[in-house]
Image: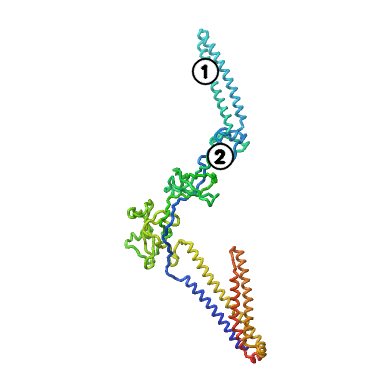
Amino acid sequence: MSHGAKRRTGRRILWLVLVAALACAGVLAGRRHLLSGESPQRYRIARVTTGALTNEVTASGQLNPVVKVLVGSQISGTIQRLCADFNSTVTNGQVVAQLDPATYQAAAHQNEGELAKAKATLELAQFNARQARALFEKRLMPESDYTAAMIALSQAQAECDIRKAALEKSRVDLARCTIYSPVDGIVISRNVDVGQTVAANFTSPTLFEIANDLTRMQIDAYVSEADIGTVEPGQQVKFTVDAFPEQIWHGRVAQVRNAATMVQNVVTYDTVIGVENPELKLRPGMTANVSIIIAHRQDALRIPNAAFRYQPSESSAMARPANPAQASRQRDGARTAAPAESHPSAPRVADAVTRVVYRLGPSGTPVPAKIVTGISDTIFIELIDGLRDGDEVIVGVTQGESAKSADITVRTQEEIAQTASETSRIMTVLLGAIASVSLVVGGVGIMNIMLVSVTERTREIGIRMAVGAKGHAILLQFLVEAITLSIVGGVIGIALGVISAKLVALRMGWPTHTSFSSAVIAFLFSAAVGVFFGFYPARKASLMDPIEALRYE
């Protein structure tokens, strides 16, 4: 092949590469322009539906027995014996602990001796008084001595009374060495051990905590001052505990106490909730996550709360009311009390208010609509009047300046799935463009290799043609060589891709899956690339003149 033919071949290859690169760049630039360019404003729409609505007040609290008695000791001493332990069932009057009585027994014996001494002194004083009275009556004793004898008798009587009281006190203290259960119940806490010293100074030490009945318990829930106004005795309550997260328990509000408590700079009120615990699964001290049911509607018209967060931008072509004050109230989402007589078909709802949402008008622009709402949960709000089941309202924008300038974006699961799908589509286009460039570059490389092979084997081709080889045989030979070269490269690429995916998955923790069909498609596509880019060199070899080929140096 001449030097000019080589230059023409190189130019053709260069032009093919440039055209492929420009095509891929055009695809990417167009895709980027479509994604980033200005587009008309599109709105996210939600429908008015029918379903259940529950207005709840949430709080947390602790499970406690309805009656919990702290059993203590009025005297000091050493624990000599324990007759009850954790979870022990006790009855009223049962002995639960025994203090060492030695000290109090000694005190009682001492007081008994002192009382006997006081009695003997009293008898002596009585004898002296009788003698003094007899002598005084016979005028044989001065009045002063008689008076002294009577006073001594009174002092002896008083001393005897004092000793009796001391003896009774020592006997009471001795009896208090035995601790009895004041109620029937279960011991939920034991705070002492045998040999431990109990010191009863200014406060009585707690030995046991006894719950009267664990089948009936209560939750002391702390409700914030913002929600306490809607909580009333008799309301239904549902709650969960961490020990049984899948089970929902039920109770009823028994009392709302007026004593306020400050918890983390928030004023809360103790709300007592009665709970039945027949299976004894609930234990004292468990944390309960409480939901107090304020109101419930089974088949209510409802509208998403996101509809009230949407406000049209000033640049939107919106039908505005003629009254400026009304327009201001609509923009601010003002709430006003809903008159009951204007909605005869609506239920009597104490917290019914009038609010404004936006719908799409005939021209595709937002149009305000006044509605009357009732109770709400965190997702939907009850619709009393203004719209019907199936009507559509605007809950946000998906494109345009409003979507770009929004401080807060609320997305539904469908929108998140749509965004993920769009991202996947963009990545597919990008990876497809990269793969296309790679295929073009690889195909051009195969074509260049085959052209070099044809050039170097020109004399061989001439000899084969001279001995009778046909052009289609030469064409098939070089096509097979190009396909083989392309398939080898494709297999290497598939292996590298699978290995890279596994390494990335191992490093990042992402799941990967390479299907057999995708590998077969890649294999066939690599063979097709070999056919496409190998056809030109093979055809060039098959069309050679045998005489010119034999003369090639």
Residue 516 sits above or below residue 263 on the image: below
Number of marks drawn: 2
Q: Residue at x 35, y 65 (%)?
A: 319
* 1 or 2: tag closer to the N-terminus: 1
Q: Quadrant of residue 397?
A: bottom left
Secondary structure of the residue carrying numbered label 1 = helix
Asked whether residue 553 is in view, the answer is: no
Which quadrant of the figure contains the N terminus?
A: bottom right
The residue identified by callout 1 is: 154
**Side of 300 where 536 appears, left or right:** right
Percent across and percent down for residue 409 are 46, 62
Asked whether residue 157 is in view, the answer is: yes
Residue placed most toward the observer, 386 or 334: 386
> Mark 1 packing: few (<14 Cα in 10 Å), some, or many (20+)?
some
**Side of 380 where 185 appears, left or right:** right
The residue identified by callout 2 is: 186
Secondary structure of the residue carrying numbered label 2 = strand
> Mark 2 packing: few (<14 Cα in 10 Å), some, or many (20+)?
many
Could you tell me the amino acid type at mark 1?
A: Ser
Q: Residue at x 59, y 74 (%)?
A: 522
